[in-house]
């Protein structure tokens, strides 16, 4: 046997023996490290996020978004299928009350109005004739009635015969029938026909007038979606006129926030892209009923409100149709003790917070809350400025447990 082989046979068992010792030592080290980490974790306590109790100004506000609309906007629609014959103003142009904006083809309307006018005139003529007949029939009836009364007296005296008296009575009855027919039938029928004919005439005349769009106010031509020579269908929007300096915003507020609003509440209106300073507004109207609307978050119950906009500063950048954000301040306090909203939990009808006490021990404390907004709540009693409270405490957080604030809380 070669010498080298003998050496290897002697060294291999020795190496394997030392290798087993090294592995065992490594296992013991790992166990020690894990044990130390566990003990260290026990000493550190439960990792929590905390917030500080601070004294600062505080406001309770409602936030919403909406679109600028012209308050006194007038819209004009085609009353029939027609053609645009003239455009007399440009979109964005200032217009005066009574100024013509556009005309549509009114040739058929002119004919219709003329025909309706003739129909009314014909009935009026018949009505005049009927009233004339009525006066004649009344006069004839009165005369025949006197003759009949005289005939009765003469008959009693034997001066006239029975046949003559009956003839006088017959004439009287015929006159009475003519009078009644004219007074109770012909005349009322003609009056009714004239009323109906005038209604039809007025409607045709109204359509003729609407064939020309005339501005009812001093304002601006906001929209003119038609062109000269184009055919338009009945109901087509022809023009939109309003005062762009008289703006409002209509939007929906959730029912909880709406219950706290009142007409006259001040509103801050912002648009980060167009306004360097907020505009002032005012809650003008709050709907007395709520309605269910579809939103990106599903069905929600909303209460419609209307906000007027103060444009006295002449903000030319704002146009009808622009989107804006609304902030409605409900309450304000110059000084208040506040904490993050998520620090408050409820149990058995009580508002509770967990304060990080000495040596990182959590202490449950009952508090009395006041105003709140989407981020913070006011603490009226139970906390002092400078204390730290645990945010969103889980079930493992109880009085007496040790906690450690995470890095983001410090």
Image: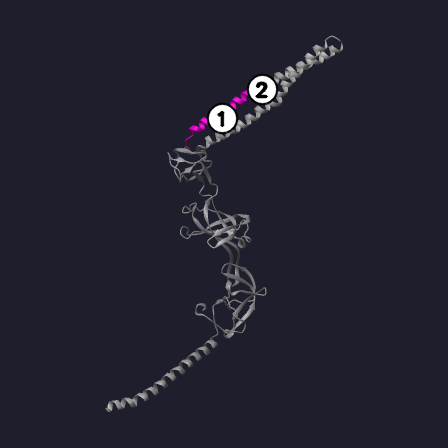
**What is the x, y in percent for residue 66?**
46, 49
**What is the x, y in percent for residue 388?**
50, 68
The front one of 196 and 379 is 196
Residue 130 marker: 2
For residue 162, side relative to residue 296 (left or right): right
Q: Residue at x 27, y 88 (%)?
A: 8
Q: Residue at x 44, y 77 (%)?
A: 37
Quadrant in the rendering for residue 96: top left
Residue 116 marker: 1
> Total of numbered circles in the picture?
2
Q: Main secondary structure of the magenta part?
A: helix
**380 versus 152 height, above or below:** below
Asked if residue 210 is among those painted magenta in the image, a careful observer would answer no
Which residue reaches farthest front?
1
Region of the chain picked out in magenta, as a range: 104-126
**335 versus 197 height, above or below:** below
């Amino acid at each position: 046997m070669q010498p080298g082989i003998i050496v290897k046979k002697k060294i291999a068992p020795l190496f394997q023996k030392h290798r087993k010792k090294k592995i065992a030592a490594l296992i013991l080290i790992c166990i020690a490290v894990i044990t130390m980490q566990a003990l260290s974790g026990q000493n550190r306590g439960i990792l929590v996020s905390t917030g500080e109790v601070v004294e600062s100004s505080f406001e309770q506000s409602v936030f919403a978004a909406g679109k600028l609309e012209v308050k006194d906007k007038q819209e004009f629609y085609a009353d029939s299928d027609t053609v645009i014959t003239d455009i007399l103003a440009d979109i964005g142009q200032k217009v005066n009350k009574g100024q013509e904006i556009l005309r549509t083809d009114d040739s058929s309307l002119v004919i219709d109005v003329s025909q309706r006018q003739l129909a009314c005139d014909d009935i009026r003529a018949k009505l005049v004739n009927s009233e004339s007949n009525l006066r004649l029939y009344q006069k004839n009836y009165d005369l025949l009635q006197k003759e009949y009364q005289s005939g009765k007296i003469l008959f009693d005296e034997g001066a006239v015969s029975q046949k003559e008296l009956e003839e006088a009575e017959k004439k009287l009855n015929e006159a009475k029938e003519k009078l009644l027919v004219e007074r109770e039938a012909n005349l009322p029928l003609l009056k009714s026909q004239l009323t109906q004919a005038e209604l039809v005439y007025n409607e045709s005349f109204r359509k003729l007038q609407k064939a020309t769009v005339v501005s009812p106010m001093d304002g601006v031509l906001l929209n003119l979606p038609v062109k000269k020579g184009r055919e338009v269908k009945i109901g087509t929007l022809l023009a939109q006129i309003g005062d762009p300096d008289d703006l409002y915003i209509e939007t929906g507020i959730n029912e909880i926030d709406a219950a706290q609003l009142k007409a006259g509440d001040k509103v801050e209106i912002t648009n980060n892209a167009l306004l360097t300073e907020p505009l002032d507004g005012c809650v003008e109207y709050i709907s007395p009923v709520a309605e269910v609307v579809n939103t990106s978050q599903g069905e929600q119950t909303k209460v419609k409100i209307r906000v007027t906009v103060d444009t006295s500063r002449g903000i030319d950048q704002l146009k009808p149709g622009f989107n804006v954000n609304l902030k409605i301040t409900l309450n304000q306090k110059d000084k208040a003790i506040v904490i993050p909203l998520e620090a408050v939990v409820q149990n058995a009808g009580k508002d509770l917070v967990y304060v990080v006490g000495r040596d990182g021990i959590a202490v449950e404390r009952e508090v009395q809350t006041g105003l709140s907004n989407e981020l913070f709540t006011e603490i009226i009693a139970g906390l002092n400025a400078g204390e730290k409270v645990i945010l969103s405490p889980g079930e493992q957080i109880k009085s007496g447990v040790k906690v450690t604030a995470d890095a983001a809380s410090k």
